[in-house]
Amino acid sequence: GNSVTQMEGPVTLSEEAFLTINCTYTATGYPSLFWYVQYPGEGLQLLLKATKADDKGSNKGFEATYRKETTSFHLEKGSVQVSDSAVYFCALIQGGSEKLVFGKGTKLTVNP
Amino acid sequence: EPEVTQTPSHQVTQMGQEVILRCVPISNHLYFYWYRQILGQKVEFLVSFYNNEISEKSEIFDDQFSVERPDGSNFTLKIRSTKLEDSAMYFCASRTLGGGLAKNIQYFGAGTRLSVL
């Protein structure tokens, strides 16, 4: 079945450091890919998405590129802020299904 | 900004008791979902609901679970006889009917933490 594997956390960075959170997936066909973020005490919020190969999703300085050849969707940000501290979830949805399939989540802590 | 609201934020129950988790989806949304996350594990899909019926469900969603949209605004998840292993964070989500950029974007609530003792 479909699955998502995410880099294990937690990740601790200093402010302005470069962030990469790795995400790879297994799916039949061509899923849509997502990054969701969960700030403390809040729900999962969509951060960015990509719907086909080579699409780049971007939002709030975060980027991820849909790489079909490596079945990856790594999240990057050039300069993290303390306010980026949260749990980040990679997810996919297969065409014809309503089911989001999530990775385990990666907790990011950014220190001033 | 419209949001999905879940109540209560924390529910404690005794094993074998029935619980109802409540959600108010975003008002113009037509697809509704429940997911759960057992501590330390992945967020798992339970069920999707559209047009007053279940459109998809996982193997987790057995006869102990049911969903309902009782009054056109609330969306509930009922667990008939809770087990210890039902302890988890339960997330409700909803999405609009639209296609294009809105397609497949599910909006989540903050979750209800269910503790079964």
Image (cartoon, coloured by chain):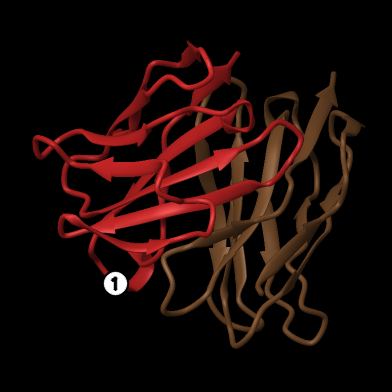
Residue A104 in percent (x, y) is at 74, 47
Left or right, residue B48 beside residue A70: left
The chain coloured red in the image: B
Residue B45 in percent (x, y) is at 52, 53
Left or right, residue B47 beside residue A20: left
For the N terminus of chain A, give its image quadrant.
Answer: bottom right
Q: Residue A96 appears in which quarter of the rendering? A: bottom left
Which residue is painted at 73% across and 44% down in the image?
A105
Q: Residue A11 appears in which quarter of the rendering? A: top right
Which residue is painted at 36% across and 27% down in the image?
B21
Rendered hue of chain A is brown
Residue B63 in percent (x, y) is at 40, 48
Report the front residue among B14 and A97. Answer: B14
Asked if B68 appears above or below B110 in the picture, the reply is below
Residue A61 in percent (x, y) is at 66, 48
Report the front residue among A34 and B30. Answer: B30
Asked if A26 appears above or below A68 in the picture, the reply is above
Which residue is painted at 57% across and 32% down in the image?
B86
Left or right, residue B81 beside residue B59: left
In the rendered image, the residue lying farthest to the left is: B71
Q: Secondary structure at mark 1?
A: loop
Asked if B82 appears above or below B8 in the picture, the reply is below
Identify the subunit bearing mark 1.
B
| Residue wearing tag 1 | B99
Q: Amino acid at mark 1?
A: Gly
Which residue is painted at 82% across and 27% down in the image?
A110
For the C terminus of chain A, give its image quadrant.
Answer: top right
Q: Residues within 10 Å of mark 1 (few under 14, many from 20)?
A: few
